[in-house]
Amino acid sequence: MSGPRIVHLISEYSTHEAMGRTVTEAARRVPGEHHLVTTRAHDGGDAFASVHELGGRIEAFPMADRDELHRILDSIRPDVVHLHAGALGPLLAQRAGLGRYPLAMTIYAWPNLPGRAAWKHAGWSGLRSSNVLPTRVALTAALPPAVVRRSVRALAPLGILSPDPRVLERLADCGTLVERLPSGAPIDPRRASRVPSNGRPPTVVFAGRAESVRGIRTLVDAFPAVVSAVPNVRLRLLLIPRPELETLLGHIDASPVRGSIDVVTEPIADLLGELANAQVGTWPFLADYTTSPPAMAVAEAMAVGLPVVATPVACVRSVMRPGVDGLAVAPGDAADLGAALRRLLTDPVEWHRLSAAGQEAVSHLTWDRAAEATGAVYARAAARPFAAA
């Protein structure tokens, strides 16, 4: 295989998660010999020349088994070591001794602590069982940007990529080029239509994990007001089963408009097709780190011209600009969400404006663009040859 040898470091790997999907797309699209080092790889290993699982706690990666990590790296002799992490990444890289390698970093998010709406609607157990409040996220939220910038200066990486505007802002003066990572939007010829075809009822769609932090209760509570304005509308919930599923199903069953809600918990073979068949997509997430930026489902919806209503949390803002190419609503506010959904279902001018704006916005966020940005960072490694210990 021609091109540089690249080792991707990620705490836990799955192609079904945003970070893992981004690593996979880089491995498939950027020329080179790609290797993966992680605590555990759940799937997708065929994208790499080799996969190395260190085991251990994901919170301690890549520091926990430093000797074994360096043994693997020295055996591969990488031209680039690419660390995929959150805002703690530069500090972890220093502690793991990665500064002696040509280092690239993707920092996916710099989350804030969950706000009042997340605590009210998801509760402690919902926050702890999701991505929103593990220990590393709480530490990151309290991390002074100056501390991270100091670590970046000490590491002198090849470059930093991020889909999160907050990372770009906080690391603007770190001494290293920090650039936006365009990622998450597929290229698909299908397009959503404001008027459903074949006599189908208008549909509002949500796709994602069955977790309280994703605002599913708020969406269900907002839907009676939507039905009052558009009596034949359907809410289609495409849920990936999680421990909270049964509790959320109970909330759905108690809705006064339960007959207008469809719940699907089986795997969706063609999510883009589902999105293209809907009239509005909605992701009323309650907190910044509900999913790692970028919010893939939001990007996929916009790619097929489906207007989006979402909350302006970090993972959504990495894709959607509130008021420009999607409607933003306050987290946990069922009345606000219901009004925005009604607006898009009943206002053809606004529907077409956001459909076109969304497609235009994500046309610059394709995986090919992500590969170009990533490859440009790797190209800087030519001036920094590998030096084994």
Image (cartoon, helix red, strand yellow):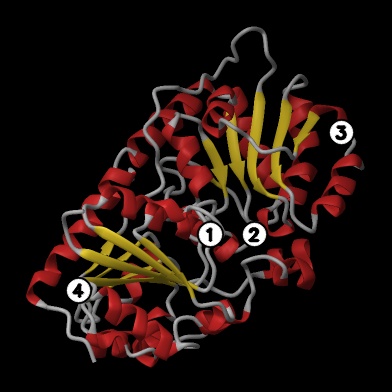
Query: For residue 286, which numbered disc appears in the image?
Result: 2
Tag 4: residue type? Leu
Please report the residue visible at 80 percent of the width from the left and 51 percent of the height from the top. 245
> Dot 4, crowdedness within 10 Å: few (<14), some or many (≥20)?
many
Which residue occupies the foreground of this view, 299 or 23?
A: 23
Tag 1: residue type? Val
Asked whether the beta carbons under mark 4 and mark 2 sit within 8 Å of each other, the answer is no
Disc 3 on helix, strand or loop? helix
Which residue occupies the foreground of this view, 311 or 385?
A: 385
Lower sequence index among marks 1 and 4: 4
Dot 3 corresponds to which residue? 258
- Write down the quadrant of residue 234 in the picture: top right
Q: CA distance from mark 1 to mark 4?
A: 29 Å
Foreground label between 3 and 4: 4
Dot 1 corresponds to which residue? 313
Q: CA distance from mark 1 to mark 3?
A: 28 Å
Tag 2: residue type? Leu
Image-based side of 92 in relation to 4, left or right: right
Q: How many marks?
A: 4
Asked whether the beta carbons under mark 2 and mark 1 sit within 8 Å of each other, the answer is yes
Asked whether the beta carbons under mark 1 and mark 3 sit within 8 Å of each other, the answer is no
**Residue 311 picture location, percent across and down:** 57, 52
Q: Is residue 318 visible?
A: yes
Query: For residue 158, which numbered disc appears in the image?
Result: 4
Q: CA distance from mark 3 to mark 4?
A: 53 Å
